[in-house]
Amino acid sequence: MSSRIEPQLDNSEPPNSRLAQIESLLRRVPWLIPTISFAAGWLGFVMVKRGEAFAFGIALVALAGWVWLLIEPLVRRYLERRKEGVGKLFANFLSQSIQQEMLFFCLPFLIGATQKDAGQIVFTALVAMAALLGTIDPVYAKVIGPHAAARLMFHAYCSLVTAIVVLPMVVHLSLERALPLAILGVTSWLVLTFPMSLRSLGTSRQKAVWVASVLLAPLLLWVLRSQVPAAGVVVTEAIVTQTIEELTPGAPIQRLTQADLAAGVVAFVAIRAPRGVAQSVIFEWRYGGESEQIIAEIHGGRESGWRTYARKQSFPADSHGRWTVDILTPQRQLLKRLWFVVE
């Protein structure tokens, strides 16, 4: 197994020697880039948790890689016009390396944000599979590397994942703004590279599938946006209680009687977000098919997390059974699920 693409070059025009030396090194140690990227991702995740400015620098590097994935087709075409074979070698080598870096960098943030929710688990698992795909050269070289349409779609996927993770850290966007902006940016890029993709496809059926993918994939992601983990936003503490004093919650409870409800119930959370991010959160109280929402706002940069709560004092005459309190983003991304039982 290796992590580089074997370029098919004309022997009369050898590639740049320095690039060839780097490629040879990475063929001998194919695990190097994924390992460094994964470690950098966890380091960035820890730094964000601590509110360190160093995380901004790591995220900025990740964003630079995202920009490369967006301009790669133009660079490839320009280099191919100047010297045949070099553009393909350089672009394939750099793109695959950056794709590995971006996905492995983003993976710790997604893992840290993934809740016990089937959709979020599937989304994070797909990112992990894509990251692994980028390191298995026989598969990558056969399925993605040689085919412009597949390569551009994989670029789009890597760019989207990276934008979701790093935009809140670098541009200080809230999650409800970062996700739509990421989808819009990647969709625009797919439209701009549309002619290049169609030229690479041989049959009408392949072209029809590509057109449908470009049109439907962003729409599907928007419909399923609640299944995307809220990367970079971490719940550090969450309990259900009945008392709170100066944002310090009382003893946690999970079971209480109907009579206890007269004192009200409090859902308390502390949420850590990147410095500079102002983020709305929703407390959704659910019972017996009915729901009630209370909206609060958090601000990033606090090491222990921004402390907030929602108090519910009005309950039905018969409230026996299990109550659930979901803490959600405005996109309905699950941050934490709390529950209590009225006996």
Image: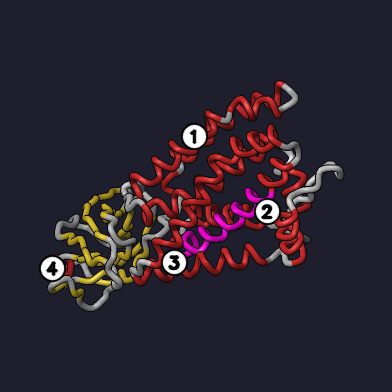
Mark 1 or mark 4, which is nearer to you? 1
Q: Is residue 260 left or right of residue 208?
A: left
- Kindly indicate whether the residue at mark 4 contacts the one at mark 1 (C-beta within 8 angstroms): no
Residue 57 counted in the magenta span: no
N-terminal of the pair, mark 1 or mark 4, is 1
In front: 85, or 124? 85
- At 24% from the left and 50% from the top, the residue drawn is 292
Residue 95 counted in the magenta span: yes
For disc 1, the marked residue is: 187
N-terminal of the pair, mark 3 or mark 1, is 3
**Distance between mark 2 and mark 4 Cα atoms:** 54 Å
Task: Tell me the crowding category of disc 4: few under 14, some 14 to 19, or many 20 or more residues within 10 angstroms, Cα based.
Answer: few
- At 45% from the left and 48% from the top, the residue drawn is 163
**Distance between mark 1 and mark 2 Cα atoms:** 23 Å
Q: Main secondary structure of the magenta part?
A: helix
- Kindly indicate whether the residue at mark 1 contacts the one at mark 3 (C-beta within 8 angstroms): no
Q: Is residue 97 left or right of residue 254?
A: right
**Distance between mark 1 and mark 4 Cα atoms:** 51 Å
For disc 4, the marked residue is: 263
> Is residue 203 visible in the rendered structure shown here?
yes
N-terminal of the pair, mark 1 or mark 2, is 2
For disc 3, the marked residue is: 45
Q: Residue furthest top?
A: 204
N-terminal of the pair, mark 2 or mark 4, is 2
- Kindly indicate whether the residue at mark 4 contacts the one at mark 2 (C-beta within 8 angstroms): no
Q: Which span of residues is magenta-colored?
A: 93-112
Task: Tell me the crowding category of disc 2: few under 14, some 14 to 19, or many 20 or more residues within 10 angstroms, Cα based.
Answer: some
Residue 275: image tag: none
Amino acid at circle 4: Ala
For disc 2, the marked residue is: 133
Amino acid at circle 2: Leu
Amino acid at circle 1: Thr
